[in-house]
Amino acid sequence: MDRSECRYCKKVIGWIVTTKGARMPVDPHLVKVDGEKLLVFPDGATARRHLGFIGGYVSHFATCEVWLRIQANKRAAKKATLARSQR
Ligand SMILES: [Zn+2]
């Protein structure tokens, strides 16, 4: 797996090519599935829920604290813009 540094939180991330051909940043260790996070399997398949699967890579977008904070801020800003435009 290709590895690099997350440009948001500077943690080491791995790259997996999904079955759709997209490069996906993942945490570079296999984890047990919790049924909620976006999982990427070593063969590139992705799934949000995967009953009975014992391990996969979690999309780094699901765990990157800096990225999640940026997304939350974006959502808040969008909401504020929407609220203003509806006045
Ligand atoms: Zn990150």
Image (tube, grey):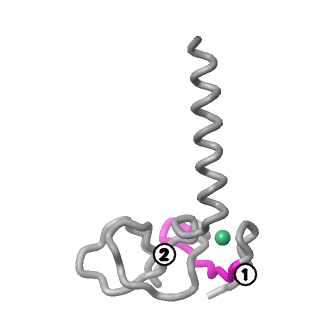
Where are the magenta residues, as a range?
A: 11-21
Secondary structure, mark 1, is strand
Image position, residue 7 (x, y; %): 75, 69
Q: Is residue 19 magenta?
A: yes
Residue at position x 35%, y 78% from top?
33
Residue at position x 48%, y 75% from top?
58
Residue bearing mark 1 = 4
Amino acid type at mark 1: Ser
Q: Earlier in the sequence, mark 1 or mark 2?
A: 1
Tell me the CA gap for discs 1 and 2: 16 Å
Number of numbered discs visible in the structure rendering: 2
Q: Is residue 45 magenta?
A: no
Say which of 17 and 59 sits in front. Answer: 59
Task: Determine the residue located farthest toward the left in the rendered image.
Answer: 52
> Relative to 45, is 5 on the left or the right?
right
Residue at position x 61%, y 34% from top?
78
Picture quadrant where residue 8 is located: bottom right
> Ligand 1 within 8 A of label 2's CB?
no
Q: Residues within 10 Å of mark 1 (few under 14, many from 20)?
A: some
**Residue 58 got which mark?**
2
Image position, residue 64 (x, y; %): 60, 68
Amino acid type at mark 2: Val
Residue at position x 74%, y 76% from top?
10
